[in-house]
Image (cartoon, grey):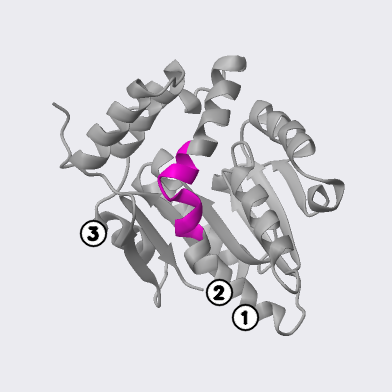
Amino acid sequence: MPSFQIRTNQDELMDDFSIQDERLTDALEQLRPINQLLGGYATTMEVLAPFLKMRTQSNQTTRILDIGTGIGDFPEYIVRWAAAQSPAINVEIVAIDANPVTVDYAREALKKRLPPDLQAKIKVEVADALALPYADDEFDVAIAAMFLHHFAHENAVQIVRSMLRISKQGILINDLHRHPLAYYGIYALTRLLPAVQMVRNDAPLSVLRGFKFPELKNIAESAGLVDFSLKWRYAFRWVLHTI
């Protein structure tokens, strides 16, 4: 039985950049329905949607940086949602990932899944979250969904601090709650469903890399966040934001 007292430092297979074949790309594809089923999109949009609606009242285009974008499914969800509003909400998203293979796959996936007008709203780039190549206040908001748990405490603090630096209006982080029910639930789900081996390995492991409330609160405070909200959401997710 795994320990839930402290975060594991065991790396996920997805963090091994030497894996460049369908083992990676098939896993990226399977994360999309998992995010839909287990509240990943809903957790982010609960905070982001009111923020975007408020800004559209003054006809402002909101520039968003999505860190650790993976297949680009969160940017895809956001631009689809924004286009469906009445009136449509103007967004521009820069989506970054440190793995060039993942970035190439995300670009091709978005070309297949989105019409040209929505494709133009997302730019996918190779960039390191630990060394963001962007100027201070270059974006309105920076988001990180299911990403921060990949990093040990000090690197997580550095990432949150950098997100704060490059965003004018604030940051939004959606990540995992380390809990036995979350672990055994996703373990069972990835074996009942036809999940690929990387997802079967990484999904339960990602829970063990997830956070307890005091840990995520400490990361936020160590990064210099003062006025922030940190709340639990379905299913076993934390949402941390300053917007």
160, above or below 199, in the image: below
Horizontally, residue 222 falls left or right of residue 162, namely left
Give the quarter of the image for residue 234.
bottom left
Q: Earlier in the sequence, mark 3 or mark 1?
A: 1
Q: Earlier in the sequence, mark 2 or mark 3?
A: 2
Label 3: which residue? 214
Residue 22: x, y in percent?
Answer: 60, 16
* Labels 3 and 1 touching (C-beta < 8 A): no
| Residue type, mark 1 in image | Met
| Residue type, mark 2 in image | Pro
Position of residue 190 in the picture relative to residue 173 (left or right)? left
Determine crowd level at label 1: few under 14, some 14-19, many 20+ residues with C-alpha closer than 10 A: few
Vertical order, 121 against 88 (above or below) = above
Q: Which residues are magenta?
A: 34-44
- Residue that numbered label 1 is attached to: 54
- Reading the image, the residue beneath label 2 is 50
Is residue 37 within the magenta segment? yes
Q: Position of residue 206 (x, y in %)?
A: 36, 35
Residue that appears at 54% across and 46% down: 130
Give the amino acid at mark 3: Pro
Place of residue 216 in the rendered image (x, y in percent of width and height, measured from the top left): 32, 57
